[in-house]
């Protein structure tokens, strides 16, 4: 084969690859999800309960609320996270009845929306890959509209972290260590919850790992 023929084949291969890339044919493409809710104002993320702990008592629930608040502050334009500590006593006062007056909580916090929910499941290894440390989770939550006086949205999200095999942004679960994995996983779950309020583009791997059941409620 002549040098000219080789050069032509190389050029053709490069052009073909570029065309495939532009056409989205080289691997799965990112997925864009619109905001589930179009909202403005203040959002209060109440630390989730879990199977053994009430609101504010679950360390994982507090971590998720902190992460969701910070991600919302950075990512949403017309929404502001509202500090959740100020209404801790009001929420906790309902522990015996296990029924919270979310309207009173929202008004006391000066929030337009209250996100409340539960950690249904959180585990730190994957039954399908028991040798690999990984967070497996399911959370269920509602968004309460203080002006309406009712929940306007409910969702259940299930997924895993990391959502690729063993790493996130080049850091493996073994490099993270148990505390690093826990911290990063709670931040990730907070981000998943926070994305209810804004448009987000996520990787194909993350999209495949996430399972969601959503319900828009009448206002």
Image (cartoon, helix red, strand yellow):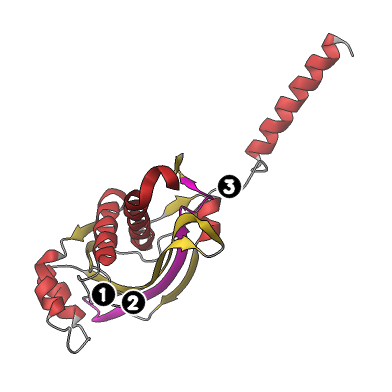
Residue 95's place in the image compared with 49, above or below, is: below
* Residue at screen point 17% across, 88% down: 96
What is the spatial separation of the Cα atoms under label 2 and label 3, in whole angstroms? 32 Å
For residue 78, say whether it is visible.
no
Horizontal side, residue 43 vs residue 196: left or right: left
Q: Position of residue 81 (x, y in %)?
A: 21, 59
Instruction: Specify which label sits upstream in the sequence, 2 or 3.
Output: 3
Q: Residue furthest front?
A: 131
Residue 49 painted magenta? no
Q: Which residue is mark 1?
A: 145
Horizontal side, residue 143 vs residue 163: left or right: left
* Residue at screen point 9% across, 74% down: 89
Q: Position of residue 136 (x, y in %)?
A: 45, 63
Residue 115's image quarter?
bottom left
Q: Which residue is mark 2?
A: 152
Which region shows up in magenta? 146-167
Q: Which residue is mark 3?
A: 29
């Amino acid at each position: 084969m002549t040098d000219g023929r080789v050069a032509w084949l190389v050029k053709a291969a490069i052009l073909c690859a570029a065309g495939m890339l532009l056409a989205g044919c080289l691997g799965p493409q990112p997925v864009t999800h619109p905001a589930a809710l179009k909202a403005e104002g203040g959002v209060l993320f109440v630390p989730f309960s879990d199977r053994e702990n009430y609101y504010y008592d679950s360390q994982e629930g507090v971590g998720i609320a902190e992460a969701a608040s910070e991600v919302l502050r950075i990512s949403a334009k017309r929404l502001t996270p509202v500090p959740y500590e100020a209404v801790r006593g009001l929420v906790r006062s309902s522990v015996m009845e296990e029924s919270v007056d979310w309207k009173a909580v929202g008004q006391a916090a000066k929030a337009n929306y209250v996100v409340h929910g539960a950690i249904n499941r959180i585990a730190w290894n994957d039954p399908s890959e028991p040798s690999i440390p990984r967070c497996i989770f399911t959370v269920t939550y509602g968004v309460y509209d203080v002006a309406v006086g009712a929940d306007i949205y409910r969702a259940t999200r299930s997924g895993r972290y990391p959502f690729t095999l063993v790493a996130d942004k080049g850091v493996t679960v073994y490099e993270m260590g148990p505390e690093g994995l826990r911290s990063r996983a709670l931040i990730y779950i907070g981000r998943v919850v926070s994305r209810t309020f804004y448009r987000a583009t996520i990787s194909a791997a993350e999209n495949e790992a996430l399972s969601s059941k959503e319900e828009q409620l009448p206002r």
